[in-house]
Amino acid sequence: MEEYFNEDDIKAPLWDTGLVRRMMPYLRNWRLHFLAAVVLVLGGTAVQITLPLLLGKSVDLGIKIKNHELLWLYVMLYGVAHLSFFVISAARNWLLQYTGQQILHELRTHLFSHIQKLPLSFFDRTPVGRLVTRITNDVATLAELFSAALINVSGEVCVLIGIGIMMLALHWKLGLAAMITSPLLYYVAWFLKVKMRDAFRLSRVKLAMINASLAENVSGMSVIHIFNQEKSREGKFDQMNSELREAELDSVFYNSFFVPSVTVFSAITMAIVTTYGGWLVSHGEISIGLLITFIAYTQAFFDPVRQISEKISVFQSAMASAERVFALLDEAPEPDLDSGREFTVLCDAIEFKDLDFSYNQDKQILKGLSFTIKKGERIAIVGHTGAGKTTLAALLKRFYDYQDGQILIDGIDLREFSRSSLRRRIGLIQQDVNIFSGTIQDNIFLAEGSFDQAKLDSIVRELQMETLINKLPDGINTQIYERGSNISAGQRQLIAFSRALATDPEILILDEATSSVDSETESIIQRSVQLLTSQRTSLIIAHRLSTIRNCSRILVLHHGRLVEQGTHEELLAQKGHYQKLYELQFAEGDKT
Amino acid sequence: MNQQAQTHTPQKFFIELLKPYRRHLFYGFLSLVIVDIADILPPIILKLAIDAIERGNEVRTIFYCGIALIATASVQAVFRFFWRQFFLGTSHRSAYDLRKQLFKHLLKLPFHYFSRTRTGDIMSRMTNDIQEIRFMLGIGILVALDASFYFLTVPFIMLWLSPELTLITMLPFLLIPVMVVMVKNSIHNRSRDVQARLSDLSSKAEENLSGIRVVKGFRNEESEISRFNSCGLKYVSDKIRLANVESLFHPALDMVIATGMVVLLYFGGNMVIAGTITLGSFMAFESYMLKLSWPMMAIGWIINIYQRSMASAERCLQILREPVAQSLVDVADPSASSAAMAVEKPVEPASYDIEVSDLCFSYPGANQPALKNISFTLPEGKTLGITGPVGCGKSTLLRMLMKMFTPDHGQINIGKTDSRHIDLLALRQLFAYVPQETFLFSETIRENILFALDNKDQSEQARDFAALSGLAGDLEEFPGKLETMLGERGVNLSGGQKQRVSLARALAANRPILVLDDCTSAVDTETEQQILNSLRKQSQRRTCIIVSHRMVSLQNSDLIIYLDNGEVVETGSHEELLRLGGRYARAWERQRIKAQLEESV
């Protein structure tokens, strides 16, 4: 829905020096290419200006004095000029496309890498779709600025100035006469362009509104039907629809003025050139060939007007895109991931001391949480949705930093360790298994080049994955479709477990799936959890009774506080919070 | 229209769309002829001027030529304005008509059409496809007529000026349409590749961003960047492959025209020297060649626009061909039996007693029935509570009652009349429905509450219903009170507020049967109790059907049904069901514990 309401590009300025300056670093690597492009643009301009001159000369020196040889010579020159113009413009076009694409590739990669470094809190508040639009569409719109607009417009401007200078140099009086209307023409063109742009904006706003209303009505169709509001909806829609039509007709109106006014101006100029020029010829001041040159210049003088005005909108949307892209690049990344102590092994214990945490000011997630996990212990955390269980995992991996209190690893504050080492050495298996496109093997060994056949064999053996892998057409090398649609829930879970085994984490956090699964998957999960956690310090956010029973200790979290802890039996005997939770979450599942 | 649409080909469809504007099109065509005549005259005038200049001492002729140039240009300018107004204006008017017609048709389509068609698909037909058709009807027709005019006139003028020179210079020009068609093909293929790479790129980005927690969790950013980079490089290389063709294409077209010019300069020049043609004719030739190059290039473009608009017209026609919901028989089951029933006269129900007997239903294509042998009786003015696990068929049962679907077997009687015999519109008038998924329109709160009323200006009434739905306090906090504009789908309201607006909307509709489909899930229990209490007071004689996961919401119902897998598992009053000690009682107990847990902080 975002795109229908995305009207920012409508308000954008034509030119923003600050934004253009920020683009410069990306051009720096390609300055030679740009230099070449500028040379080609200038060369093309020079050839374009020469053509009418050659035409005039061939009339004067060939046709008028009936000199076949000179005519032949000028025809050849004329042909060569055209041929070189062909080569130059093809080369220019190609070079601009090529360079533009390379620059954008750099920008796109830079943008993507920047996004990778942003903290998780950024992703919490930014929809994925918007980021994808930035990376693809906005960067592509910027491409237009480089290739089409920037260089072509400057090329057109060069042609205009070139023709002006040539006309004045050849015969300043006739040149002045030819250009006398151009200030007025440019004024009219600019005036109409502004009007057209305003009308066009309005019709785009109306179109966006109509699309939004359409989407709304289609999705809410059953509500319309139930309340018998077909007629009133039709009326409302018709009103918007006719507003759109009127806006479009307005924009057609101003548009209809533009081309005719250019036609009139060019005709007036042509009339001035032929009558005054003809008078000059008959008085012997200029040759007929020069007059023909002037006529050809006049014909060429009016094209750039149209071209330049067409490019205005490209500039605008490119500026709007640039603004959005740079705003994204301005988002502060996570501090250096590698700075700080390297975390390798846990010697003694992880200690949580009076831990306070909130994602935003409104809601405190953890309140004065304190407990200790000894090395090699297997801990279960239970509690309601929103009790703060998943937050604990995110804090341990330093996805977020806590505000008050401390997490100590062997007595050292967690924040002294590098994010990098914590994320590598603390494994997290999440509820939703994110599958990436690629093979099963790629999905197990996520980091590039981390593949290790011996490790794979041992993983397959330990998790007893043989039968599951054999079911797949290409075994471990089976290509997984987008979002893993061709593998089962059990296979997904196995991939998640294998990923964790492949990195052999020192500490394991397991966020158990809440949803009920089929019995095959259930047995896979039980077996794997047992295996993964048996030799490791592990923290299990548990939703299954079987898991809990196997843990050495259970922590009961409630509204961000630790309310009870102990073994399953101890806690049940307390007849407190856990017992109720047990009846609610586990007992029912246990029976069925 | 619907009947007509079924037999329409896209071409006939276009004619139909343009028919109301045939007068405009006629004037447009006249303007076009005048513009084109005024456009092909200047080279002749230029020829006369140059010939006069060459002869010398004919200042008057030259001056007249100058005047003539300005005159033709002015005529051209005036009628160019009209042609755009007439042709492009018509295309926008037709687009309006088409959009209106499609929307009107959509409003009449049955429920099941929307359940099997994605909103995005309908949207794209109503936006992109209409745009394609508008292009064809406006600029497409204009350019086609314009180009035909040039083809039918300019070559003859050139032949009149000099037959030999025409034949020689036009030879290279014949290459243009061939080139356009050939190169367009290769450009098309290559841009398709580019599009595919672009979509790879964006799915890579999307995949990465949705899995960013895994990426960061495994400290895997670098290899993701290098994977993205390689997708990007593939895109760039395909883009450059496209650029190879594209950057050559326009210069090559220019080169073909230039070849014609060189040929003209050589042969024409020699003919001027030999005295076969005048210098003026030579210059006129140059202008005409330039004028012909444009329609040559336009051919390929017109073909392209035409083909795309045909496909788009077909897609719009598909919507128009969808059969509308018929008043008597729901189209979900257009079988012979229901067609027979359609003959009978529609009946108004005598009372609002609801009697469901032996109801069975399966969704089309589903292998499991959604409802199995459901029977119950709900007398007018009583309250029915329905509960059961997710997917047990609660919402389906409500849909059947409101005739969004037709039962496979069994029947629903309302006031002793088979609901199949009740007119669809009349039947819908009986129900005030609060759907499970709250859907509000991006209008003011007042307009949303008074949605079902013809007069949507009664603020007092809107306020009363808001109060009844427990919205009074919230309303005070909104910046514009009742006049607060809701964002799309009510995004600026909390889930609970949205549900209560939706409830107020149903109450304002003032229909004999109130249907609440789990509509207070986002409201806390206490508020919910208040709302239900005030509802009970206000609408004692109204029949109520309440679907809820919260047993407390149902405990005061006259009859409670516990559904599972589309079957009635338990039924009775709250007390009866508790005494029974079955599924309902267990669920009740669990919710009681949960409530206790939540209270103890």
Image (tube, rainbow, N blue to C red):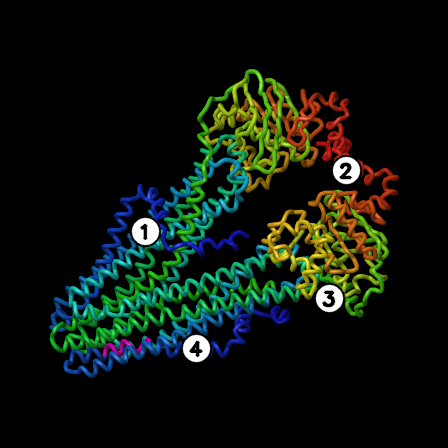
Q: Is residue B268 above or below residue B529?
A: below
- Mark closer to the observer (1, 3): 3
**Amino acid at dot 4:** Phe
Q: CA distance from mark 1 to mark 2?
A: 70 Å
- Mark closer to the observer (1, 4): 4
Along the line of sight, which residue is nearer the eye, B560 or B282? B560
Q: Chain of mark 4?
A: B
Residue A212's x, y, as percent?
A: 56, 57
Q: Residue A518's quadrant in the figure?
A: top right
Q: Chain of mark 1?
A: A
Residue A163's x, y, as percent?
A: 22, 63
Given contact means CB atoms under 8 Å apart, are the residues at marks 4 and 2 in contact?
Answer: no
Given contact means CB atoms under 8 Å apart, are the residues at marks 1 and 3 in contact?
Answer: no
**Amino acid at dot 3:** Ser
Question: Is residue A102 in sight in this rendering?
Answer: no
The residue shown at (47%, 22%) is A342
- Residue underneath mark 4: B29
* Element on which disc 3 rests: loop
Residue A94, numbered label: 1
Q: CA distance from mark 1 to mark 4?
A: 41 Å
Residue B327, numbered label: 3
In the rendered image, residues at marks 4 and 3 fall on the same chain: yes
In the rendered image, residues at marks 3 and 2 fall on the same chain: yes
Q: Is residue B338 magenta?
A: no
Sequence order check, earlier mark of 4 and 3: 4
The residue shown at (31%, 57%) is A153
Q: Which residues are magenta?
A: B39-47
* Element on which disc 1 rests: helix
* Element on which disc 2 rests: helix
- Residue underneath mark 2: B591
* Element on which disc 4 rests: helix
